[in-house]
Image: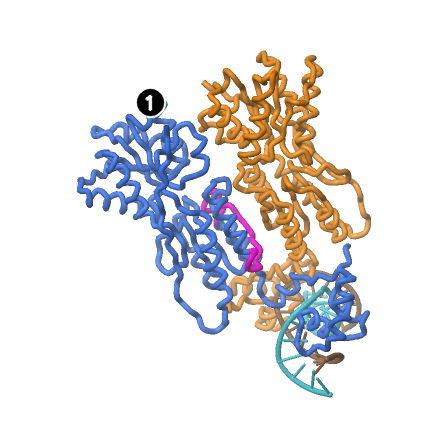
Chain colours: A orange, B blue, C brown, D cyan
DNA sequence: CTGTTAGCGCGTTCAA
DNA sequence: TTGAACGCGCTAACAG
């Protein structure tokens, strides 16, 4: 066992009381300069380090933030996570992570674990298969605040950070309309996701303002797997009014969709044009990237979410329950790739 | 404040002692069935949950594993991390993460933080710019075991998991030699990395066994940035004996190298052929992927590293210091892509 | 079978 | 300017 020195040991060696040592170490005003020096001297000699766990325990706080997200291997989430990590560390918080791998069940288990570990608060991007939100609601009883980001549930009274996918979609649509496309399809994501609903809104608004009439058959959804995307493509390509352009849920889905189109001998950017969301760096290397992508600023989202949570945690006066909900919307931007 | 019930409150309501409650909850043999039932009944009524922090504190253990790695956005590391997470959770450990972003300074800070948080042990893949290892050595004094994986320091007496890059490189070389290449170059990584040294070993051994003579000019190293890789390519392409094939440190570097080659009007797989390491899924989507890639099995590495660490942590008898070092080498495999 | 006591390391009263 | 005492929630050693 590594016998790390404690405050009491220092006290004994100096023939003073532990509380004096504690105060000296905390630079308390009422401690004589002489003892202060003696204590600090010995403390650094012994390589004293306060036992955070003891402190956390007695302060009933862990200074730990739990982060739950679908997949760290997706560039969007790992960028967002980096921001969360950076921002948390700046605010003296540590970060506990769990990946839901898009399973609701795993999400629940992770929450259970985080609760057991008494994290101070949670930052969450929900799994695509999550259908109910009671496991999040329940956290209110435990006084564990949750800030959602990007993949947020469509329910009232939550803290969240997200991109405005409605205006993002409108930007994408206008870009395509301006390029002359008149039959534009959409491969959307799971309907439960607020972001999916916003995409539809934006799609319809863009058509209306043009104006063009809205054909519901042009919107299909994918479960985001390769197979789901292929089924979606199949549907779209079998329409009588075949779309000349597609707005696709995200870059990963777009890559699958583009591969499918190529396998059907369609010429990308001639027979059919793709626009998607996320603007992943990997698009720079791919053979046929989407011609444009709605940037969602993962780093900013992660940072803002963390700031909101830390703010929430430090305003813990203990009495005044403030039932105000913070949210922050990042305006999305259309990134246009130059495909030669 | 969320007033979670404690063991003492349950005890009071039942007019028994806290320790009885504790024992009942732990299914201790010596507790009467009747009281056991009563306790459990009330506990579940009150939604009692043990305060892990209190337990950790008094057991002087946190059941937390610290993970330090360069970049979660690199597919290799996020896959390895998923394995670490899965395996840890199975063993009832939580996971604290920190990304070094390949900076030695950040690495040190993260270690400091992990130490303060009293993690039970550490799993580390070192930053590419790390030159000294004393910040890891120092952890021995604190009795915090470290298991390195993939990017391991080339020093004795450490626990580690890694792929055998020497044989991996030999496989890559043999593949190229069999395809008829006689002038094969290498873009290697930072020389401090053990994996870089192994690559050189494998490179030389493969040549010798063929046999072909070894020309040191054919090996250059990149700092893994795009610019570093471009400089390396420049060097290689300016040789009198121009290589017809290149073995490249990893898939990311390969993509940059390939883009550079294309910008110089070289025909990929005709004028010059690439083989790399990691076998990232993204290679399936890229325009010109390397023709083969040495698979390094991130999931297996992460899993094995966690198992070794957990094993180490549970063998803590407290007395017998066992200075044996565990290591595990995964045999790497050459994945051949079909590029039409 | 069950209760009492003590202690994990620290900060924070209250009292001197 | 300092010390003594207490408690955070829990487990464990020692008594009954």
Disc 1 sits on a residue from what chain?
A: B
Q: Is residue B275 visible?
A: yes
In the image, residue A114 above or below residue A218: below
- Residue at 37%, 40% in the rendered image: B335
Q: In the image shown, does B128 or D3 lie closer to the viewer? A: B128
Read off the residue under disc 1.
B264
Of residues B106 and A204, which is closer to you in this image?
A: A204
Kindly tell me whether residue B116 is visible in this rendering.
no
Query: Residue, x 44% and y 26% (percent of image)?
Result: A287
Q: Residues within 10 Å of mark 1 (few under 14, many from 20)?
A: few
Q: Position of residue A61 (x, y in %)?
A: 68, 56
State which quarter of the image contains the C terminus of chain B: top left
Residue B205 in the image: state x and y as whole percent: 23, 46
**Residue B137 percent location from the top left of the image:** 43, 58
- Is B322 positioned to the left or the right of B187 in the image? right
Task: Please determine whether, in this image, residue A9 is positioned above or below residue B243.
Answer: below
Residue B43 position, x and y percent, is: 75, 65
Q: Which residues are magenta?
A: B89-107
In the image, residue B215 lies in the stretch drawn in magenta = no
Dot 1 falls on a residue whose secondary structure is loop
Is residue B90 magenta-colored? yes
Asked which quadrant contains residue B277, the reply is top left
Side of A257 where B125 appears, left or right: left
Q: Residue at x 60, y 29 (%)?
A: A249
- Left or right relative to A196: residue B288: left
């Amino acid at each position: 066992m590594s016998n790390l020195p404690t405050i009491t040991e220092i006290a004994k060696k100096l023939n003073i009381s532990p509380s004096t040592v504690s105060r000296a170490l905390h630079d308390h005003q009422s401690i004589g300069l002489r003892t202060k020096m003696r204590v600090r001297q010995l403390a650094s000699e012994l390589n004293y380090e306060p036992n955070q766990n003891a402190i956390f325990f007695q302060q009933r706080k862990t200074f730990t933030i739990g982060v739950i997200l679908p997949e760290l291997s997706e560039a969007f989430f790992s960028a967002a996570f980096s921001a969360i990590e950076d921002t948390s560390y700046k605010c003296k918080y540590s970060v506990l992570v769990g990946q839901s791998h898009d399973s609701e069940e795993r999400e629940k288990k992770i929450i259970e674990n985080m609760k057991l570990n008494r994290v101070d608060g949670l930052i969450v991007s929900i799994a695509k298969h999550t259908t109910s939100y009671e496991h999040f609601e329940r956290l209110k009883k435990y006084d564990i605040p949750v800030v959602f980001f990007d993949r947020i549930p469509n329910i009232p009274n939550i803290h969240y950070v997200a991109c405005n996918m409605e205006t993002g979609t409108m930007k994408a649509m206008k870009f395509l309309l301006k390029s002359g496309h008149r039959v534009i399809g959409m491969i959307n994501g799971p309907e439960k996701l607020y972001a999916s609903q916003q995409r539809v809104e934006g799609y319809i608004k863009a058509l209306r303002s043009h104006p063009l009439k809205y054909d519901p058959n042009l919107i299909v959804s994918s479960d985001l797997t390769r197979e789901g995307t292929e089924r979606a493509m199949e549907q779209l390509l079998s329409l009588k009014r075949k779309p000349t352009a597609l707005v696709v849920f995200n870059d990963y889905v777009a890559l699958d969709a583009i591969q499918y189109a190529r396998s059907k001998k369609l010429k990308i950017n001639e027979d059919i044009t793709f626009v998607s969301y996320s603007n992943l760096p990997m698009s720079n290397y791919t053979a046929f990237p989407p011609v444009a992508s709605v940037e969602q600023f993962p780093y900013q989202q992660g940072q803002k979410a963390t700031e909101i949570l830390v703010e929430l945690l430090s305003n813990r006066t203990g009495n005044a329950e403030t039932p105000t909900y913070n949210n922050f919307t990042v305006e999305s931007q259309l990134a246009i790739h130059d495909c030669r």
